[in-house]
Image: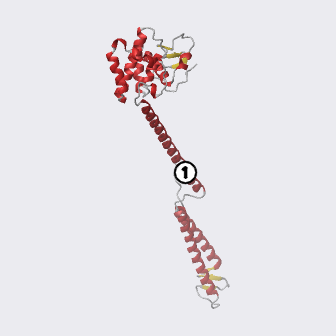
Amino acid sequence: MLVKLNFAIPKGVAKVVFSDEIGETPANCNLRTRIIKVNPLYWKKLNNDQRFYVIAHEAGHINLQTHSEFEADQYASELYLESGRSPKQSVFAISKVLPLENYDQRKRLELQLERAAEYDYGINNNNNALKILKIMNENLDNELDEYEYSFLGDDDDDDDDDNFKGKGKARREAKRAAKATKKADKNTRKNTKANSKAAARDKRSEAKLIKSQGGDDSGSGNDIFGKAMEGLKQVGDTVGQIRGKSVEGEEGSEGGSQDGSRNAEGDKLIMGIKAGTFYVIAGVVAVVVCVGLWLAFKPKKKQTA
């Protein structure tokens, strides 16, 4: 069964699973398969920071390809402290999973206490951590006894029981706030991009609709149509003027003139041409003029890619 972690799995680790087959060991790993097995009974006793240290320790075995517990502790400590977690909890991560019954186990706890105190003083400028380092240097034969109560007792986060009262908590909160701000900025950019795409789609849809209704909205088609209508109007006016002249000639003397008269057979003449023939010629001229105007001013089809 996979273990649900509240943090990213360290690099080099294939997966983390629960196992009831590892006995009293809190956790172990397979250097070849890169799988970490966790004892569920121990896992329940640890808080999130302590769980991170335990997984980082096993990742040290895997990535360094070593069976040395001290080398794995050094790897885990560096990964843990760089994450900005509480230095104190890295010490508890060892004291809560090891029985501290032999020299190696107690030495591992001492070394982690020293690394945590050095980090807390160097990074957070914590004077309490400096006091711990001074006492450890003055009492090399029995360092752990000075802190046996603190690191084998209560491991809550109350300030009254915390030997590391540095800025770890504030740094973690600042890191979380920066992460939240980064996520908010990412969402803002994503929404802005989506809105831009939506606006572009709407604009393309509007252009297609205008085109389907008779051309684009540039007005060029309307201008050509207007010019054609103006040309037809001029032809109509010319024909009307000609017809007006013929009527006027008709109302004149019966003999008439060259512009409006009747021939010997009594047919009506317009500009010396029979009326019927004149109207046919005028109609043909009008059609020719309209076609010429349409050809001259018709909109050109847009080439599509």
Where 96 sits versus 184, above or below?
above
Residue under pointer 1: 204
What residue is shown at x 54% (from left), y 66% (from top)?
Answer: 293
State the residue in front, 160 or 194. 160
State the residue in front, 69 or 131. 131
* Image quarter hosting the N terminus: top right
State the residue in front, 242 or 167. 167
Residue 157 spot, x, y in % from top left:
48, 27
How many numbered marks, from 0 up?
Answer: 1
Q: Secondary structure at mark 1?
A: helix
Residue 138 in sight in this render = yes
Most extreme residue toward the top, as rendered? 102
What residue is shown at x 54% (from left), y 59% (from top)?
Answer: 217
Residue 305 in sight in this render = no
Amino acid at the residue labelled 1: Arg
Residue 2 spot, x, y in % from top left:
56, 20
Describe residue 69's horizontal placement relative to residue 293 as left or right: left
